[in-house]
């Protein structure tokens, strides 16, 4: 027959391009123009391939079933450590969340702060105006006495210093009148410094005299033991020194004003003090 006969081409097999018995390899080598082979051989190959696939699927199914059976049996027993740890963590998280929710819904009551104690400086019923006045009040100096008996303000202030010392010593009013009358005669109730003692001019003074070292309201001399220059320039100290000397004179209360003053001062003009008795009584009466 002619080799191009279609029957011969179908019945007469040609040798394959490769020695491989796999029909798939022949198809890969021949490509698009593969040679016609035995139809039964292709069917057998297809059946063999299908049987292999069925067997493979059956094997996989069997393996999965066995794994499921093992897992089911293992679940009946204790879970794996990783699973148990995860479950424990979830349980703790659930408890924390429940605790936090319960705290949010019912917060614990805060302790009440103690009420502040009332201020000791002001009572609860005190008015603001009264408190403001109490805080703004400052100690004030007593008003200066108004001059009497023709005295100046400075003379009246010095007379008050003499009387205040007598009141503090609790001596009789008669002694105060003697002291004021003596100061009127000795210094005209002015605080004198001495031109002979420059130190005396360093202290507050109202006039300067030149009668030896005599200083102050009573013209007392430091050289005679009455005190230091600084002490005698203070009206309060000079007045106390005069009172203490008067109280040491025996029977001074029964003496006339001029004799009692002379007993203390030992002046060259012992009768000069009497002229000031009435005025000194008026001043003392105004200051006591």
Image (tube, helix red, strand yellow):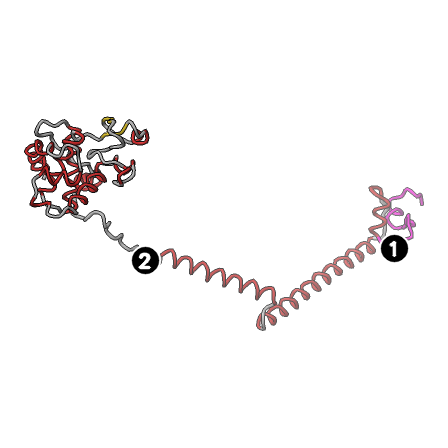
Few, some or many residues within 10 Å of mark 1 (<14, 14–19, 20+): few
In the image, taking residue 73 as reference, residue 253 lies left or right, namely left
Q: How many labels, in total?
A: 2
Q: Earlier in the sequence, mark 1 or mark 2?
A: 1
Query: Outermost residue, front direction?
Result: 268
**Magenta stretch: includes residue 16:** yes
Q: Nearer the viewer, residue 101 or 41?
A: 101
Quarter of the image holding residue 2? top right
1 or 2: mark nearer the eye: 2
Image quadrant assignment for residue 255: top left
Q: Would you say residue 60 sits in the magenta stretch?
A: no
Which SS class for mark 1? loop
Nearer-the-camera pick, 78 or 74: 78
Residue at horizontal 73%, vertical 59%? 53
| Res 210 visible | yes
Q: Secondary structure at mark 2?
A: loop
Quadrant (top left/top right/bottom left/bottom right) for the C terminus: top left
Distance between mark 1 and mark 2 Cα atoms:
95 Å
Q: Which residue is mark 1?
A: 21
Residue 156 appears in the figure? no
The crowding category of the residue bearing disc 2, from other C-alpha atoms within 10 Å (few below 14, some 14 to 19, many at least 20), is few
In the image, residue 212 lies at what x, y percent? 26, 30
| Residue at screen point 68% across, 65% down | 63
Please name the residue shown 62% across and 68% down the image.
71
Residue that carries the numbered disc 2 in the rendered image: 111
Q: x and y percent of residue 141 in the render?
A: 19, 36
> The N terminus is located in which quarter?
top right
Instruction: Specify start and end residues of the magenta stretch as a single range.
Output: 1-22
């Amino acid at each position: 027959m002619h080799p191009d006969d279609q029957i011969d081409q179908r019945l007469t097999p040609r040798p394959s391009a490769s020695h491989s018995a796999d029909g798939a390899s022949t198809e890969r080598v021949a490509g698009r123009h593969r040679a016609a082979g035995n139809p039964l051989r292709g069917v057998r190959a297809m059946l063999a391939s299908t049987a292999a696939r069925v067997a493979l699927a059956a094997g996989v199914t069997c393996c999965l079933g066995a794994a499921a059976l093992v897992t089911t049996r293992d679940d009946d027993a204790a879970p794996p450590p990783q699973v148990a740890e995860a479950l424990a963590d979830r349980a703790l998280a659930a408890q924390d969340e429940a605790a936090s929710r319960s705290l949010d819904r019912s917060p614990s009551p805060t302790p009440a702060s103690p009420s502040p104690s009332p201020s000791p400086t002001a009572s609860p019923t005190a008015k603001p105006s009264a408190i403001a006045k109490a805080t703004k009040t400052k100690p004030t100096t007593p008003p200066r006495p108004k001059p009497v008996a023709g005295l100046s303000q400075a003379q009246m202030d010095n007379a008050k210093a003499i009387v205040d010392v007598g009141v503090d010593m609790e001596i009789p009013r008669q002694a105060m009148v003697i002291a004021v009358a003596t100061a009127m005669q000795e210094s005209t109730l002015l605080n004198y410094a001495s031109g002979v003692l420059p130190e005396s001019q360093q202290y507050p003074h109202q006039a300067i005299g030149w009668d030896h070292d005599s200083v102050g309201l009573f013209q007392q001399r430091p050289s005679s033991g009455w005190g230091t220059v600084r002490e005698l320039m203070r009206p309060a100290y000079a007045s106390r020194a005069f009172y203490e000397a008067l109280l040491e004179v025996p029977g001074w209360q029964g003496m006339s004003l001029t004799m009692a003053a002379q007993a203390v001062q030992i002046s060259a003009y012992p009768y000069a003090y009497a002229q000031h008795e009435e005025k000194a009584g008026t001043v003392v009466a105004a200051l006591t």
